Amino acid sequence: MVSARSDGPVALKIMVAGGFGAGKTTLVGAVSEIRPLRTEARMTEQSLGVDDTAHVEDKSTTTVAMDFGRITLTRGLSVYLFGTPGQDRFWFMWDELARGALGAVVLADTRRLSDCFASVDFCEERELPFIVAVNCFDGVESHDPLVIRAALDLDAEVPLAMCDARDKESVKTTLITLVGHVLSGLSTAEQGVTS
């Protein structure tokens, strides 16, 4: 989404998707210049057997609507980040969160890589430009990006980035990668029109 008036500010909307516990809330919070809006609720006994907490045993809250953060790049140019809930029972909200988005960052956790398949499929089905950012958790075995790309069956043009969702500079680099990917796609599309 690019929103602008001739005399007003420009806002870009980016969706942050991924599986349960992949670090979406952390990513939005790490880079937001405002106190992020978080719609987290305490996990209850009702989520037992429903939410797979393998590898995130210490997780006690979960996003139930969205996360929201903002970054001002220059005077009059802002990026709005909308983080999705990760569990499939909240997927009905994804279309609304994606509406008008410039693109998406799909956050992946290599301990549970299959949890991001739904986010990748969502973006592909809607032709929403996206990148996959592998969240580098402490103490987790690192994997060759080519192996991760093959496991996710990513198209060659989809960027794969390594990211620390807790680190502001790492998150900024990830967002820059997404914007570059989107601009590259626009440039390619324009070349196809003029050929």
Image (cartoon, rainbow, N blue to C red):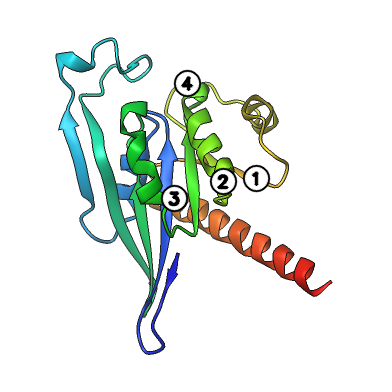
Instruction: Tell me if label 2 and label 1 are in contact, CB under 8 Å.
Output: yes
Give the side of residue 97 with respect to residue 111, left or right.
Answer: left
Q: Nearer the viewer, residue 7 or 75?
A: 7
Q: Earlier in the sequence, mark 3 or mark 4?
A: 4
Identify the element where label 2 is drawn. Answer: strand
- Seen at 28% across and 61% down, the residue is 33
Give the side of residue 192 with respect to residue 144, left or right.
Answer: right
Quadrant location, the N terminus: bottom left
Instruction: Tell me if label 2 and label 3 are in contact, CB under 8 Å.
Output: no
Q: Nearer the viewer, residue 101 or 33?
A: 101
Write down the residue under mark 1: 158
User: Residue 6's spot in the image, x, y percent?
Assistant: 41, 88
- Seen at 23% across and 17% down, the residue is 47
Identify the disc placed on residue 112: 4
Cα separation between marks 2 and 4: 18 Å
Cα separation between marks 3 and 4: 21 Å
Q: Earlier in the sequence, mark 2 or mark 3?
A: 2
User: Residue 146's spot in the image, x, y percent?
Assistant: 70, 31
User: Residue 35's spot in the image, x, y percent?
Assistant: 20, 55
Identify the element where label 3 is drawn. Answer: helix
- Dot 3 amino acid type: Val
Write down the residue under mark 3: 171
Q: Earlier in the sequence, mark 2 or mark 4?
A: 4
